[in-house]
Image (cartoon, helix red, strand yellow):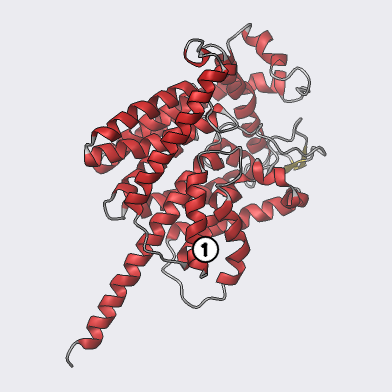
Amino acid sequence: MKIRTLFYIALLIGLFGTVTNLIFISPLPSILALAVLPYLFFRHSVFVIPRFIYYLYIYFLFSLAGILIYYPPSLLAFGFYRYDGNFIISYLPLLLIAFFSYNVAVDSLFKRFLVFATLVNGVAFGLNLVLTNFAAITDWGNPETYFHGFFKSTNGAGGFISIVLSLNIVLFLQERKRKWLLMIFINFVFLIATTSRGSLLGLIAGFAFYFFDRTNRAYLIRLALFAIVAVQCAVLTYTYPLYTMYVRDADLSEAGASTYISPLFGEVSTKSANIAIRAVETWPRAVDCFLHSPLIGTGFGSVNDVPLRYKGLPYVVSLNDQPKKVFNDAHAHHSYLHILGEQGLVGLAIFLLFWHALYRYLKKGADSIVQKFLLVSYFNLSVMSFTEHRITSPSNALPLVIALCLYMLKRNFDTKKRNSVVSTSSMESPI
């Protein structure tokens, strides 16, 4: 079997496997990419490499250097790839994509995927209703009954369903069929049941930004992003001093967030507590890392190694010297702050160059259902990442990355076919 066929099959399995992160199916393309990537550099045929792929290679190399400097044993730990280094799992398939082409019927494929994902989530939703004695739709204040599908967390499920719903809405707007409208309602119920507010915000913003982009009102996108950043900076101006006073040097291993939540805010609901944790602990922690090492950050994987202990040139270049290394999801709950804290201005700049170049690539693509879905999902994931570390999370990023790989396989195939026709025509032209 040819490698390109094997890669295509892996992408198919990975795409349909994104419906869960309880069983590790979706990372299959990443594992294959890791296995065959060294071989590909000896190939002579390669398609034109898009600019965003170049930036992604640079970001991978920069991150690898950061890992080797901070804690090299991370590379041998499964937990690292599951949590701290999950961007490797999420984006590794893209490093292969410039080497292959395949005639993929992408539109029909993603219609099948939408139906499959909706059915799987329907089964999970039904099980959740039965197991909670229907409390999932009657007791909205109980975190134990929140819908998380076949995912570990409600945010993971919410982000995935938000991406699926983006595809669903794009299909309905394109074809105006009642079955897509019915599925929009069903998937929207699933999304609401997760109580993931960031996922709902991302969905709304994704379509709003897509509309602004298509109507040549990109200035509204920039204005909205500026407003989000300004509001979050204002929040951090207030909460960062609270972090330095109550959280930075505290041992949260036993009492956890209650160490500071109750004294500062009193008794609050679970959802309100989650907001407080972001505002007072996780966001300021990433900012603290950035302030102590603004250029290159405090080390890849260092944000959740607490309490933070800095070693180096203060406020210029420092690493987190905490001897206890952990791999968990106690990240910054904000993708851009997380990257800024661990990899500094240099790392964030490289990642944003990659991210913006990806947008330019998608924008130049020919109109199709999948191209529109990818653009909406791109905006969706970009906005969700302001409230959670979504941009590297496999549950949220892999559906976009695998869809992008399949879309690029088809684009490469069309380019190869077009060039072949031009070459043949040129050879047959009379002298």
Query: Horizontal placement of 188 versus 56: left or right?
Result: left
**Residue 113, percent across and down?**
41, 44
Which secondary structure, mark 1?
Answer: helix
Q: Nearer the viewer, residue 189 or 62?
A: 189
Kindly give the residue lying farthest to the left in the view shown.
430
Q: Residue at x 61, y 41 (%)?
A: 23
Pointer 1: residues within 10 angstroms few (<14), some, or many (20+)?
Answer: few
**Residue 267, percent across and down?**
63, 6
The answer, for residue 133, to whether it is visible in the render is yes
Work out which quarter of the rendered image holds the C terminus and state it.
bottom left
Kindly give the residue lying farthest to the right in the view shown.
323
Query: Horizontal placement of 24 versus 15: left or right?
Result: right
Q: Quadrant of residue 286?
A: top right
Residue to which mark 1 is pinned = 6
Q: Nearer the viewer, residue 407 or 205?
A: 407
Kindly give the residue lying farthest to the bottom in the view shown.
431
Q: Residue at x 73, y 15 (%)?
A: 259
Q: Amino acid at mark 1?
A: Leu
**Residue 288, percent across and down?**
66, 32
Query: Horizontal placement of 321 versus 156: left or right?
Result: right
The answer, for residue 216, to whether it is visible in the render is no
**Residue 130, percent across and down?**
53, 19
Q: Quadrant of residue 285?
A: top right
